[in-house]
C-alpha cells in the first residue's frame, strides 16, 4: 500500500537532531510524524526561527541544497530550506511525497488556498481512511491567490512529509480551460486534470424554437466530433436503451428534439474536451511517457442542470470519441452555492442523483464528481447511498473559512479590517460566483463584540459567503506596496498551527461522517 518499508519512521528522534536543533534555535519545533530514515540518513521537518526546513542528519545529505549546518556528536545536521528544488529532491527520495493517479477510488478533494491547511486535511482523511486529493486548485484560484501550480504542489509535498503521510494522494489541476493551463500543471507534476469546457456549453439549448435548434444542430463542429448530423440522429433517436447500473435499470430514450437539444447543449463542449484530452495525452507521451493520470470532464459551472438523458449522451459520446474519464461532474439540480448547505428540493436531488449514479456506473464506471461540495451536509447521505464507492467530492474555500477562525479568535482588529474590506469588495467579487448573499443581513464589524466575531461571520450563511468569495481580494490586497492582510494572517496561522489544524479536522470530519461511505482505499502502486 505504501513505500513505508523503504523509509521507516524513527522514534525517538536521534539525540544529534534534537540537540543540534536546540543549538540553532532553542524554540525550534520538530514535527515528530515526519521523522524518517533512509540509507542511514535521518530526515525530519522542523521549524527553525519561524520557518520550516528539512533537517537532515547524516554524513551525506543526498543532493539537497543546504542552508545552515551544525556539527553535533560527530554528525552533521543540515538545515535545508523548503525551496522548489528541495521539494523535488524530497519527492525523489520519498516517492510517497509525490502525488499519484487515484483511478476510480472514491476521494475527497481538499483545496488549500493558503498552503497551510494540508496537514489538517491529511489528519482528517487519515483518521477516516479516506483517500485525499490534496493539491486541488483551479487556474482561477491560483490567479487569485498569486500561487503557481508548482508552489501549490510543493506546499503539499512539504505538508505530506510533515505528517509522514505515506498512503498516497492525488493532485487535481482543476478547471483547465486551455492547453496552456494543461502545460503549467503537467510540468509541475499534477496527476489529475479536470477539463472544464463550460464556455462551450450552450445554455440556450433547452429553450430554442425548432428552427433555431435545427440551425445550431447543423452548425455543430461535426468534423471534430467525427460524425454527421444524420448519423448522430440515427444512433440515438427511437432506440431506447436500458442503462443497467448496480442499483437499478434506467430507460433512456430520445425523440428528435431531445437529441438535438442534448447535442446542441453539449456538442461543442464534447469537441473541446476531446481536443484538450488529446493534447494532454500527447504532452504526456512527450514529457512523462508511460505515466498514468486521472481525467475529469466538468460542466458544473453552467446555468442549466444536466438531465439524465443528457448525461447519457455525454457519456456515450465520450466513449465513442475514445475519451476515457475517471470522473465526470454534471451540473446537478438545485443550487451549490459557496460555503453553505445545498439549496433545493432534496427529493428531486436524490431522484436525479440516482439516475446520474446509474449512468456513471453503466457507462464506464467513472466517478461522479461533486464540485462546490463543501458544507452540503443535507445531501451527503444521498451521495453516500447512491455513489459512496464512486464519488469525488471537491471542497476548496471552506478551508479558507476555517482558517479565518484563527484571526476571529486571536486577532479581532485584523479580522474586523478583513471583514470591512470584504464588504467593500463584495459587489465586484460576486460577479464570478453564484451566491444569494444578503449583505444587509450581516452586521458591520464595528457593531460586533470580539467574542461574537466567529459566530457572526463564520457560522452564518451570509457572513460565510461574504468572506468566501472575497478571498482573492483579501489575499492580494496591498497597502503602501505591502500585503495588507496576508502576511499577518499567515503568521497568525503559524503561531496557532495546531489550533488551525484542529478546526480543519473537525470540519472535514463532519463532511466525511456525513457521506458515511467515503472510505476508499488505494490499490498498491503500479497495480
Ligand atoms: Zn467546479
Image (cartoon, grey):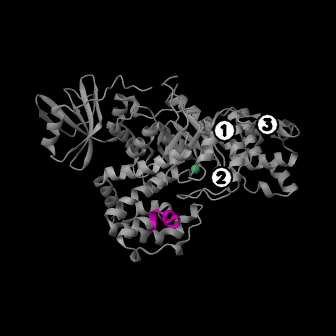
Q: Residue at x 46, y 60 (%)?
A: 471
Q: Earlier in the sequence, mark 3 or mark 2?
A: 2
Instruction: Tell me the quarter of the picture where residue 422 sits.
Output: bottom left
Q: State the residue position of label 3.
A: 227
Please tell me which residue is depicted at 62% across the width and 59% down the height of the picture.
343
The answer to whether residue 218 of the structure is visible from this angle is no
| Residue extending farthest left | 73
Distance, label 3 to label 2, CA atoms, is 22 Å
Q: Residues within 10 Å of mark 2 (few under 14, many from 20)?
A: some
**Disc 1 designates what residue?**
274
Q: Which residues are magenta?
A: 456-466
Horizontal and vertical percent for residue 201?
70, 51
In this figure, which residue is indicated by the disc labeled 2? 199
SS of the residue at dot 1? helix
Q: Camera-side residue: 415 or 350?
A: 350
Q: Nearer the viewer, residue 352 or 42?
A: 352
Amino acid at each position: 500500500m505504501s513505500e513505508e518499508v523503504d523509509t521507516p519512521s524513527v522514534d525517538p528522534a536521534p539525540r544529534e537532531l534534537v540537540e543540534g536543533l536546540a543549538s540553532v534555535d532553542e524554540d525550534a519545533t520538530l514535527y515528530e510524524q515526519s521523522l524518517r530514515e533512509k540509507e542511514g540518513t535521518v530526515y525530519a521537518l522542523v521549524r527553525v526561527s519561524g520557518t520550516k526546513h528539512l533537517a537532515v542528519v547524516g554524513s551525506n545529505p543526498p543532493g539537497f541544497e543546504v542552508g545552515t549546518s551544525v556539527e553535533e556528536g560527530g554528525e552533521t545536521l543540515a538545515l535545508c530550506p523548503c525551496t522548489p528544488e528541495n521539494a523535488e529532491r524530497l519527492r525523489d527520495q520519498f516517492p510517497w511525497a509525490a502525488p499519484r493517479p487515484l483511478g476510480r477510488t472514491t476521494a475527497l478533494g481538499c483545496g488549500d488556498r493558503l498552503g497551510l491547511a494540508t496537514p489538517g486535511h491529511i489528519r482528517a482523511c487519515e483518521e477516516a481512511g479516506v483517500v485525499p486529493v490534496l493539491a486541488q486548485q483551479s487556474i482561477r484560484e491560483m490567479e487569485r491567490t498569486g500561487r503557481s501550480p508548482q508552489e501549490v504542489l510543493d506546499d503539499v509535498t512539504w505538508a505530506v512529509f510533515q505528517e509522514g503521510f505515506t498512503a498516497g494522494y492525488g493532485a487535481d489541476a482543476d478547471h483547465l480551460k486551455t492547453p496552456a493551463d494543461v502545460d503549467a500543471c503537467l510540468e509541475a507534476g499534477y496527476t489529475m486534470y479536470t477539463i472544464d469546457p463550460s464556455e462551450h456549453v450552450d445554455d440556450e439549448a433547452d429553450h430554442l424554437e425548432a428552427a433555431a435548434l435545427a440551425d445550431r444542430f447543423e452548425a455543430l463542429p461535426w468534423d471534430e466530433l467525427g460524425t454527421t448530423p444524420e448519423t448522430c440522429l440515427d444512433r440515438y433517436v427511437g432506440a431506447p436503451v436500458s442503462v443497467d447500473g448496480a442499483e437499478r435499470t434506467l430507460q433512456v430514450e430520445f425523440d428528435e428534439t431531445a437529441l438535438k437539444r442534448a447535442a446542441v447543449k453539449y456538442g461543442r463542449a464534447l469537441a473541446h474536451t476531446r481536443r484538450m484530452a488529446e493534447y494532454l495525452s500527447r504532452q504526456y507521451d512527450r514529457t512523462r511517457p508511460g505515466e498514468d493520470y486521472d481525467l475529469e470532464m466538468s460542466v458544473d459551472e453552467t446555468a442549466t442542470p444536466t438531465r439524465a438523458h443528457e448525461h447519457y449522451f455525454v457519456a456515450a459520446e465520450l466513449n465513442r470519441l475514445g475519451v476515457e474519464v475517471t470522473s465526470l461532474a454534471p451540473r446537478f439540480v438545485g443550487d451549490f452555492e459557496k460555503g453553505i448547505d445545498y439549496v433545493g428540493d432534496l427529493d428531486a436531488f436524490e431522484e436525479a442523483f440516482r439516475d446520474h449514479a446509474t449512468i456513471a456506473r453503466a457507462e464506464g464506471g467513472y466517478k461522479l464528481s461533486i464540485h462546490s461540495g463543501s458544507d452540503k451536509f443535507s445531501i451527503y447521505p444521498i451521495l453516500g447511498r447512491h455513489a459512496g464507492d464512486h464519488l469525488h467530492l471537491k471542497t476548496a474555500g471552506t478551508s479558507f473559512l476555517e482558517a479565518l477562525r484563527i484571526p476571529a479568535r486571536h486577532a479581532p482588529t485584523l479580522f474586523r479590517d478583513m471583514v470591512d474590506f470584504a464588504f467593500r469588495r463584495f459587489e465586484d467579487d460576486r460577479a464570478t460566483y453564484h451566491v444569494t448573499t444578503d449583505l444587509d443581513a450581516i452586521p458591520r464589524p464595528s457593531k460586533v463584540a470580539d467574542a461574537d466575531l466567529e459566530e457572526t461571520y463564520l457560522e452564518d450563511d451570509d457572513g460565510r459567503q461574504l468572506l468566501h468569495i472575497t478571498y482573492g481580494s483579501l489575499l492580494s490586497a496591498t497597502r503602501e506596496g505591502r500585503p495588507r492582510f496576508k502576511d499577518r494572517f499567515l503568521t497568525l496561522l503559524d503561531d496557532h498551527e495546531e489550533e488551525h489544524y484542529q478546526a480543519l479536522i473537525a470540519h472535514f470530519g463532519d463532511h466525511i461522517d456525513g457521506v458515511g461511505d467515503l472510505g476508499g482505499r488505494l490499490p498498491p502502486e503500479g497495480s
